[in-house]
Image (cartoon, rainbow, N blue to C red):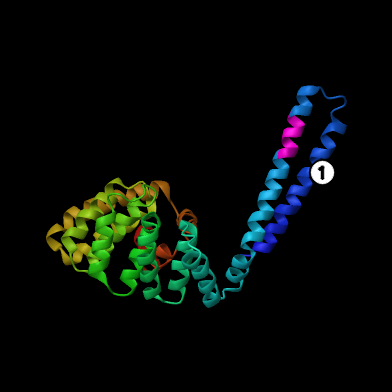
Amino acid sequence: MKFKSIYIFFSITLFILLFILILIPRLSGSPDNDFWSFYYLLIILWVLLFSLVNVLYFLNRKLFSLMESENWPALIRYLENRIIQKGRYSTRLVRLLANTYLELSDTAGVMNLENISGIVKPLVVDENVLIFGLARILSRDISGAVRFYQSRRENANPQIRDWVCFYYAFSLILAKEYKQASIELKILARMSKNMLITALSAYFLDGVLSHVLPDLYVEFRDISYSARTRVLKNLPNFDSWRRELSHLSKEFYFTSLQKYTDKTKEWLYG
């Protein structure tokens, strides 16, 4: 992502807006007092917005530069200094550092970050539960992943709760606790409003668990195909599926599932 280009684009857009604001009084003839009050308010808002864009860019330009160049080791050093040394444990920065560790397959770095964040600011761990749990899976600590997701799925942020429940079920499958995994996936396939989670849950029921729990094949088939019908009403073709995936294309916890999203796509539309 070209952050400098985005900054220049916003700056040009704001200057065009300023030019329009300058022209408004000339085009309005003899405006009354109400007009001038509104006009000055627009000018103040423009100044505030322009100042905000500049402050945000110049405060973070080194961060943007390192991200653009994909210099992951230097980015890690920069973020460690900003987060750990200076104590700026924001959800956004912690998530970025955790993702950067995973870019270098440094799961130990993610776990260390989680331990430190949990002491200093536990809320940051709760907000990044997906990436910290994924580190356990990638480091093959499957039992640890099961416990981690299980302890957090009930109180997870509503925006990511279904993902936490899905990853709990996924870690149960990796731990070969198939019946418990099926309980979680059946709920998600029936109830989740997230079509990606619904589709993945249905695929795992029909394409994976039905083979290891053959006695439950009919139940899994009925639930999964009902879920499939619901997904296809919302995502009727490949293009709609790709658009849905694109919303999460930058999330490490999602891109790590690409093998299964590809299989789910074939199961849905093949």
Q: Residue furthest left?
A: 215
- The C terminus: image quadrant: bottom left
Q: Quadrant of residue 60?
A: bottom right
Give the overall secondary structure of the magenta segment. Answer: helix
Q: Position of residue 112 (x, y in %)?
A: 37, 71
Q: Using residue 177 as the reference point, say whether residue 58 is left or right of it.
A: right
Q: Is residue 40 magenta?
A: yes
| Disc 1: which residue | 19
Mark 1 crowdedness (10 Å alpha carbons): few <14, some 14-19, many ≥20: few
**Image quadrant containing the N terminus:** bottom right
At horizontal 26% and vertical 54% (from top left) the residue drawn is 224
Would you place residue 46 above or below residue 5 in this image?
A: above
Query: What amino acid type is highlighted by mark number 1?
Result: Phe
Residue 6 rendering spot, x and y as whole percentages:
67, 58
Specify whether residue 76 is painted magenta: no
Residue nearest the observer in this picture, 112 or 223: 112
**Residue located farthest toward the front when viewing the structure as drawn:** 86
> Which residue is depicted at the point 22% across and 68% down?
143
Residue drawn at (44%, 67%) of the image = 98
Q: How many marks do you count on the picture?
A: 1
Identify which residue, 141 or 91, lies in the foreground: 91
Does residue 145 appear left or right of residue 129 in this picture?
left
Element class at badge 1 = helix
Residue pictured at 43% horizontal, 50% vertical: 235
Q: Is residue 61 in view from this perspective?
A: yes
The x and y percentages for residue 106 are: 41, 76
Magenta-colored span: 38-44
For residue 231, side relative to residue 182 (left or right) = right
Please say if 162 is above or below 113: above
Picture coordinates of residue 116, whole percent (x, y): 38, 66
In this orientation, does residue 270 appear? no
